[in-house]
Image: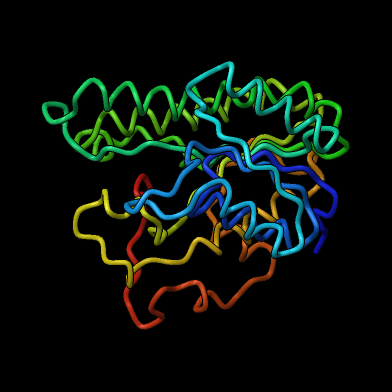
Amino acid sequence: MASLAGKTLFITGASRGIGLAIGLRAARDGANIVVAAKSNVANPKLPGTIHTAAAAIEAEGGQALAVQCDIREEEQVQSAVAQAVERFGGIDILVNNASAIWLRGTLDTPMKRFDLMAQVNARGTFLCSQACLPQLLQSANPHILTLAPPPNLNPAWWAPHTGYTLAKMGMSFVTLGLAAEFRERGVAVNALWPRTVIATDAINMIPGVEARRCRRPEILADAAHAILATPSRELTGRFIIDETFLRERGVTDFSHYAVDPDAELLPDLFLD
């Protein structure tokens, strides 16, 4: 499999969970990881900070730059990109991982929550892509990878939590547009989504989910690695499901990704 050695990845929300797992996988190749996230100090409710993530990445063999960054703030994003370029000389890959979730109906969704999801998910994905693209366009193999589902207009996914679905699908539609806009310029723009629920802190927001019925973030990290190591002109504009893509690449055993190999896995949201 191709390597990400020497590549620079700008990963939002990389202090924990899926973002950190993607960073750790790339670090094992010897990649440079920009850990762009809000968590600067330890929080007993949410373990992991940009500093602990950077230390873990360097322990795996990568180079890390910890940058406190709220992707709702344009100046902070521009500053984070500038710091990445100063440290590593450019950016080859953007991973739009940061996301906000609130799985409630319309009458139980405060506008503060609605605005947070809209600003982090769709707007944040657009802003980070816009800020990184001048650097990506100079890269030999540029990729934007966004953690977003295939676009889905099935009302069953909208009725229970319209605010969250709108914000998450916003990330999907940004992916759709950027892929078409930058295809001829050689920038791969794809989305990645899990077939099953992934055991991260976000499952605390999903009623009735047991961690034992989930997969570990490493399945998304391996799928992301396979995508990002592919020549950018050969893979763009796709809404990729982790298990399906890994099967395309020859993986047949998925048992080690399960928290409990004997438990029945829960399908993730937005997949009919």
Q: How many marks?
A: 0
Please report the residue visible at 67 percent of the width from the left and 57 percent of the height from the top.
57
Question: As drawn, is 251 to the left or to the right of 148?
Answer: right
Residue 220 lies, with reference to residue 235, above or below; the image says below
Rendered location of residue 120, percent (x, y): 44, 28
Question: As drawn, is 175 to the left or to the right of 160?
Answer: right
Please report the residue visible at 32 percent of the width from the left and 21 percent of the height from the top.
115
Name the quadrant containing residue 58: bottom right
Question: As drawn, is 19 to the left or to the right of 88?
Answer: left
Residue 4 lies, with reference to residue 246, above or below; the image says above
Rendered location of residue 190, percent (x, y): 62, 39
Q: Nearer the viewer, residue 165 or 108?
A: 108
Please report the residue visible at 38 percent of the width from the left and 28 percent of the height from the top.
167
Q: Residue furthest front?
A: 41
Question: As drawn, is 9 to the left or to the right of 242?
Answer: right
Q: Nearer the viewer, residue 245 or 105?
A: 105
Rendered location of residue 218, percent (x, y): 55, 64
Where's the N terminus, which quadrant?
bottom right
